[in-house]
Image: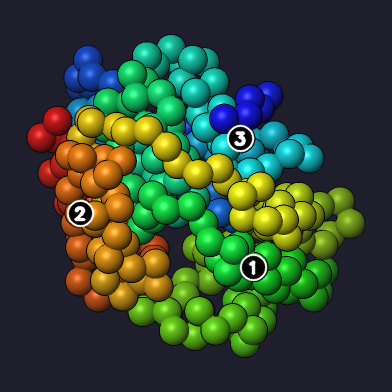
Amino acid sequence: MTKYTPVPLSFICVQPDDGKCHDAPPIVFLHGLTSFKSHWGDVPQEVANATKRKAYVIDARNHGDSEWCDEFNFDCNVEDLLHFMDYIGAKRATLVGHSMGGTTAIKTALRAPERVESIVVEDMSVKRLPQASCDILARYLRIISRAVQEVPSDVDESTAKNIIGKIFLDNSPYAKKSVKPVDHQGAYQLKRMSDSRFYHSFNAEVLIKAFDKKAEEVTSENTGEYCGPAAFIYGDKSPIQVGNDEEVIKRSFPNAVLMKIEEAGHEIHRDFSTEFKKSLVDFINTI
């Protein structure tokens, strides 16, 4: 695996409300592509309360408040995560990742199993991203990028998000098939700059450039084996269809359990939050 220079990551630390925290490895939450740490909503706090563990919620490179740079691929995220764990003094951690964050958790567990207590992967398989998916993501990024550029400078943030959401829905076949209506207010994070215009909370230019490349340049093939506890939580209505990959998953994660959430799509932690939190807490409390 090629070595990449890690970047510092923005994060928030969440502790149980009652202040009672077990001496156990922390939980690290890893968001999906174009997302951000607050997209997890109340999940980290409720999981911290229920497990009595400290939780960290991070922004990936080129996302949110973390460093923006010219380099991006899924393997960079592994370097960043391990560097972050060193920074907070965590020898091991339980990794909870959605989509791209799930890929980061998978790759980290396979590359440095001694640093991972367990992983929970939300709606992502272990197979390398196919070229067709890279092409779809590049198109998605362009749609969102164009949508933000079309937002007038004299509207408030709520209106801006609704405008972006409408443009996205009008141009995205996947969004039209979404199991639940898209929450435009929670789906996008915007920044208003000195020119009064809104901008992305992610580095659109660098991400588009990354997904315009061949799939093997976006992410390396996963190799190795992780024999620790692993849970793959997936929606049976998601286009990713993780449930069909059980055999492939168990080659790399022989102790993996697959947890199906009925009627859920890709964003289980938002659309089926109660079911997701219960599955996550039940799994972590059995470790």
Question: Mark 3 is on which residue type?
Answer: Cys
Q: What is the quadrant of residue 177 in the picture?
A: bottom left
Which corner quadrant of the image does residue 125 belong to?
A: bottom left
State the SS at label 2.
strand
Q: Residue at x 54, y 84 (%)?
A: 173
Using the image as rendered, state which of residue 105 and residue 176 is in the foreground.
105
Q: Report x, y in % for residue 16.
A: 26, 30
**SS label for mark 1:** helix
| Residue 258 circle label | 2
Q: CA distance from mark 2 to mark 3?
A: 27 Å
Residue 82 vs 89, above or below: the answer is below
x, y (%) of residue 164? Answer: 66, 74
Q: Is residue 36 above or below residue 84?
A: below
The circle on residue 45 is none
Q: Is residue 32 left or right of residue 138?
A: left
- Quadrant in which residue 220 is drawn: top right
- Report the residue marked by disc 1: 135
